[in-house]
Image: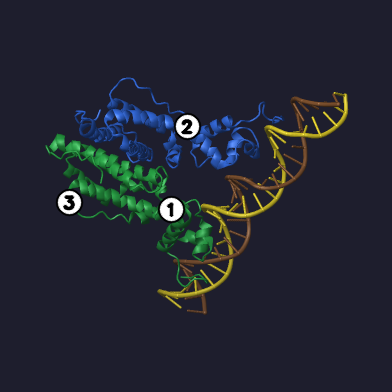
Chain colours: A blue, B green, C brown, D yellow
Amino acid sequence: MAVSARRGAPLSPEEIHAEALRLIDEQGVEALSMRKLAAALNVNPMSLYHHVPNKEALLDGVRTLVLSEIKPADDDGSSWQEQIRGLGAGLRALAHRHPSLYPYLCAHPQLMRQDGVSDVLCRVLAAAGVPEDRMAAVRNALFAFTAGFLLAEINGMFPGRDDAAFEEAVTLIVNGLSAYGRDGSGGTAHAEVSPG
Amino acid sequence: MAVSARRGAPLSPEEIHAEALRLIDEQGVEALSMRKLAAALNVNPMSLYHHVPNKEALLDGVRTLVLSEIKPADDDGSSWQEQIRGLGAGLRALAHRHPSLYPYLCAHPQLMRQDGVSDVLCRVLAAAGVPEDRMAAVRNALFAFTAGFLLAEINGMFPGRDDAAFEEAVTLIVNGLSAYGRDGSGGTAHAEVSPG
DNA sequence: TAGCTTTCCATACAGTGTATGGCTGACAGA
DNA sequence: TCTGTCAGCCATACACTGTATGGAAAGCTA
């Protein structure tokens, strides 16, 4: 195992992905090139290709690295409304931690296939009274809504980071979900119109 | 006004934007290059730069060209629920007409600044009972939700074009908005839980 | 006709992703 | 200790990108 003359240890995909994420957070996705990444790792550009098939696969790896940050909390006994707010806030925090990468997260179905999140979300939706046969559609809609809202926020739709707008959006969702409870399982959750 | 030896008429920004949109719809945004565009127009690559400052401005022009397709209908007297559905369906049709460009539409605040749409949307939201002081937040949330849902759909979150999922999503929104009517203006719109 | 302006084009440069093939140094077996 | 073998690394090269620069040609006005 010949090791680079200029480095003490051999490269690894993990190291490459981590450094790529650092560069992306610093300078934006567009600014990331294999050459710059190699320079940051003090390595020849072609060395990267022994650990990563190509740039697209590299970005895939960075995306899954970021998505691994999502760790939805277990059921803590709070109301489904609170848990919905919590999940939304979690994704929002991630978007703001990696604002430059976030649009590229949204542009790939990867984001939707986070099973851990999906399971938790379904559990919460069931508590909200969403019937089983519509669960998938509602879950998808909710996920897409949240991701889309955050994308708009990241892209500067609102002036700066507008917490009130986010609260209003989540409230809209919670109110929409409440209809399922009123109709199906006979829950009596009254619409909460005030955000916050 | 020297005219290209190989063309009958001088170039124009309109012609360039239109051809760029054609190429994008055909081959995707990533495949668009100044050289290919020039070849499609039977012109030297550098000729483009006399009508368009650079590639970013070119894409800006293509985006506004596409956005000009949005022509929200006037108030036709139908219920606000129906009008919400109509607006959503309009944006959805646009997304499906230009699936390759759509993610780039979402990635720029341009999309949000379509005043014509904004005005119509606000009128409908007022009819739904959204109070004036929350109008901007609700409008933004709604716009972001819809754009995000369509982005997820375009990016292959659902298997194919899933009309039922879209209906479920719009229903979720309508139900959410209904809470404003119940609370604020005393409207009695009962939640409609069934999509379609 | 002369000059000006508009449009176009040829060349060139720096930067990109990556295919190809050769070098280096660590290990296994003799 | 000598000799493969091979993983890891690197130098070179190619086709492509956006675009800066400067010059040529065609129409207009004077």
Residue lying at the far top of the rendered structure: A76
Q: Work out whether mark 1 precedes mark 3 in sequence or the reverse, and give the earlier one.
A: 1
Which residue type does callout 1 highlight?
A: Leu
Q: Is residue A177 above or below residue B147?
A: above
Q: Is residue B59 above or below residue B40?
A: above
Q: Which mark is residue A66?
A: 2
Instruction: Using the image as rendered, state which of residue A170 and residue A39 is in the foreground.
Output: A170
Instruction: Using the image as rendered, state which of residue B57 and residue D6 is in the foreground.
Output: D6
Q: Are marks 1 and 3 on the same chain?
A: yes
Residue depicted at x 51% and y 53%:
B31
Residue depicted at x 55% and y 38%:
A58
Q: Are marks 3 and 2 on the same chain?
A: no
Residue B133 appears in which quarter of the rendering? top left
Secondary structure state at the residue bearing disc 1: helix
Residue depicted at x 55% and y 33%:
A17
Which residue type does callout 3 highlight?
A: Ser
Task: Give me the C-alpha separation between circle 3 and circle 2.
Answer: 45 Å
Residue A127 appears in which quarter of the rendering? top left
Decide if residue B142 is in sight here: yes
Residue D15 appears in which quarter of the rendering? bottom right
Q: Which mark is residue B78?
A: 3
Instruction: Using the image as rendered, state which of residue B56 and residue B63 is in the foreground.
Output: B63
- Residue B109 placement (x, y as % from top left): 36, 45
Q: Which residue does the numbered mark 1 point to in the structure image?
A: B59
